[in-house]
Amino acid sequence: MKEDTHSGSVRIVMLLCWILSLAVLMIEAVDGRLNSTKELDAVFLLLWLVLEAESILKLKKKIAKEGFRETFKFNGAEMLWVILAFISVIVMLASQSGWMRWVVLLRGPSVLRRFNDEKTFEVIGEMIVVVLILFFVVPFFNIIAVALSAPGQIINVIPQNIDFFALNYVIHDTAFLKSFLNSIFITVAGTLIGTIAMAMAAYPLSRPELPFRRGWMVFYMITMYFGGGMAPAIVLMNALGLMNTIWALILPGTISIYNMLLIKGTYEGIPIELNEVARIDGASEMCIYFKIILPLSKAIIATTAFMQIVNFWNNYTSSILYITTNTAIYPVQAYIQNFMNRNPMEIAAYTPELLAYWNNLKTAYLLVAIVPVICAYPFMYRFLQNGLTVGAVKG
């Protein structure tokens, strides 16, 4: 009983030491000012000593009991960790370089393997998920806090001395609102065109009776993996007369071969007997597609449509490549980038109060640009939840 309790305590201590070691490395990676500070180095060294000592003692017992060859056969990764960890600490102390310390990741499999009961493993998985969520959520709350705070405040995730000047300036910026409307049009038009085209192109590819089906698949796969590059794309847009037009921001991104293959996989998961029964009843292919196939595939189509929405809304590259003079059709991402590249003193010459709010203004623009995707997500979540796994099992 005591031995079991001791074993359980050891594995919990090892797990905490490993997680804390990763936390130290992530803190240093996120904040460059903390890179290789003496305090964090001391914490990491202490955690390393615990992990290293436990590994050495465990391996020593196994070697004494089973022999070196058998121990190396089943614990080779842990032996490798002992050697590399020792080398990494020497490098850390000698050169003050922290990159070798990421070898602590190799200790993970040995630590987690001890938690082989399902409930404990679920708890560990949930802890990791929470940490990952925090890495994404905290920066977002920081943007909100900076956008709503008065200038000159020390801000983390909670607004300090709430001030709506920056947000009020952004929503009354007519040029920004014009770019916002441009992005809405680009996103809606591109998503509709792309989703309809991909959904209809995927249907014949999913039918085994399609002539030269393998050749068509090879053609599509080549276009997915290989492209001509930026220069041919610009030449093509110019030859088509689309340069400096809003369609240059829409048409190149309408088709995603990856999304089309996702839809194709879902079509193939629909029982072929449904098509055969419909044909016996006199239904045409168009009727079968719109009355049977599409209703059964709405989850994956909604999922790919949401992917298209995100891609079009965040697309910044197309405006750089294809828009050289007509800045009136800039999407919101290009407008924000141009604003951030401006000299604050140049703007302050006309509106002096903006100089103090410069950082607040930048985050306010980012906050308003993020809002549409955040608002769209709750409506699409039901489809996303089903669409990412639909077609995984054919029945």
Image: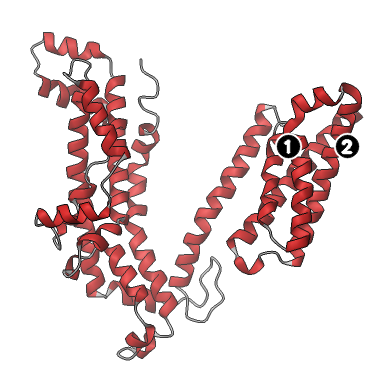
Name the side, left or right, on which 135 lies relative to 232.
right
Q: Crowdedness of circle 2 by 10 Å Cα count: few (<14), some, many (20+)?
A: few
Identify the residue shown where x is 20% and y is 56%: 234
Q: Quadrant of the N terminus?
A: top right
Question: On screen, 327 above or below 215?
Answer: below
Instruction: Pinpoint residue 204: horizontal percent, then vertical percent.
Output: 18, 24
**Residue type indicated by callout 1:** Val
The label nearer to you, 1 versus 2, is 2
Name the side, left or right, on which 61 lies relative to 153.
right
Q: Secondary structure at mark 1?
A: helix
Question: On screen, 294 above or below 350?
Answer: above
> Are the residues flagged by discs 1 and 2 in contact, CB closer than 8 Å?
no
**Residue type indicated by callout 2:** Leu
The residue singled out by tag 1 in the image is: 111
Q: Quadrant of the C terminus?
A: top left
Given residues 336 and 102, the one toward you in this image is: 102
Work out how far the residue at label 1 is from the one at label 2, CA to CA, in angstroms: 15 Å
Question: Which label was assigned to residue 273?
Answer: none
Instruction: Pinpoint residue 359: horizontal percent, then vertical percent.
Output: 44, 76
Identify the residue shown where x is 31% and y is 44%: 306
Which image quadrant for residue 347?
bottom left
Which image quadrant for residue 181?
bottom left
Given residues 151 and 72, the one toward you in this image is: 72
The residue singled out by tag 2 in the image is: 57
Name the side, left or right, on which 247 lies relative to 42.
left
Instruction: Pinpoint residue 134: horizontal percent, then vertical percent.
Output: 55, 53
Residue 301 visible in this rendered orientation of the protein = no
